[in-house]
Image (cartoon, helix red, strand yellow):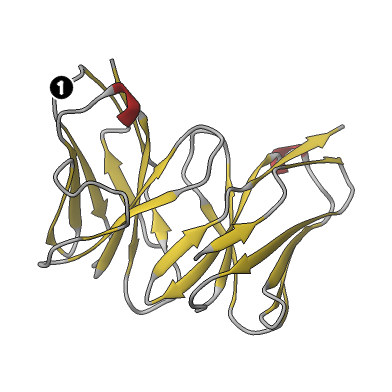
Amino acid sequence: GAVVSQHPSRVICKSGTSVKIECRSLDFQATTMFWYRQFPKQSLMLMATSNEGSKATYEQGVEKDKFLINHASLTLSTLTVTSAHPEDSSFYICSATTGQSDEQYFGPGTRLTVT
Amino acid sequence: GQNIDQPTEMTATEGAIVQINCTYQTSGFNGLFWYQQHAGEAPTFLSYNVLDGLEEKGRFSSFLSRSKGYSYLLLKELQMKDSASYLCAVRTGGFKTIFGAGTRLFVKA
């Protein structure tokens, strides 16, 4: 089956610093990747949709300049949380689609803690 | 607006059957998904319905009624490992998917 990886799995950073999270499709080319954020005991909130080679489409309320998304290749998308604050602490999950089936393949998630 | 409703928590007994309901009101509909998520892990795919009716897959079944904006996930022969959150999600257009808040299922012995 299709496998999506994320790196790092956990990261702790200080307030004001930036953190980059990578999402890779390991055995397929992902035409579209999605970034979600999940707070404890809450569901996944879609942050943005990214297509390879084009600008990401952000959901309402998500700051483009704070959450930088780059989808440079068909197997890699990155999310950079800039000038992180404690309220950005969350579980960030990416998913990818091949464009050929209905299924979305989720990465294992990245736990970000901002101190 | 987009709205997906499902119960917050449910409790059931090992070996029993449990039905988790989901109602939705979305601007578009291109299929409904059910995912299982254990704490601290990513969601795993359970089922996908795009046409009305029941889809059965082992101990899990999912039902969809598009006219009613309603779906349910049926879990049979419950096991302790089924304790998890179950997410109802609607694909509204293209591959964009909106998730419900999830139902936390507790399976007791």
Q: Quadrant of residue B80?
A: top right
Q: Is residue B84 left or right of residue A83?
A: right
Q: Residues within 10 Å of mark 1 (few under 14, many from 20)?
A: some
Compared to A25, does B48 lie above or below? below
SS at mark 1? loop
Compared to B101, does A88 lie above or below? above
Estimate the x, y position of residue A111 in percent, counting from the top left: 36, 31
Estimate the x, y position of residue A105 in percent, counting from the top left: 40, 59
A17 or A111, which is in the foreground? A17
Compared to B12, does B75 lie above or below? below
User: In which chain is the residue bearing label 1?
Assistant: A
Q: Residue at x 69, y 83 (%)?
A: B67
Estimate the x, y position of residue A71 in percent, counting from the top left: 15, 58
B40 or A2, which is in the foreground? B40
Q: Is residue A77 left or right of residue A39?
A: left
Q: Amino acid at mark 1?
A: Gly
Q: Which residue is mark 1?
A: A16
Q: Residue at x 59, y 69 (%)?
A: B25
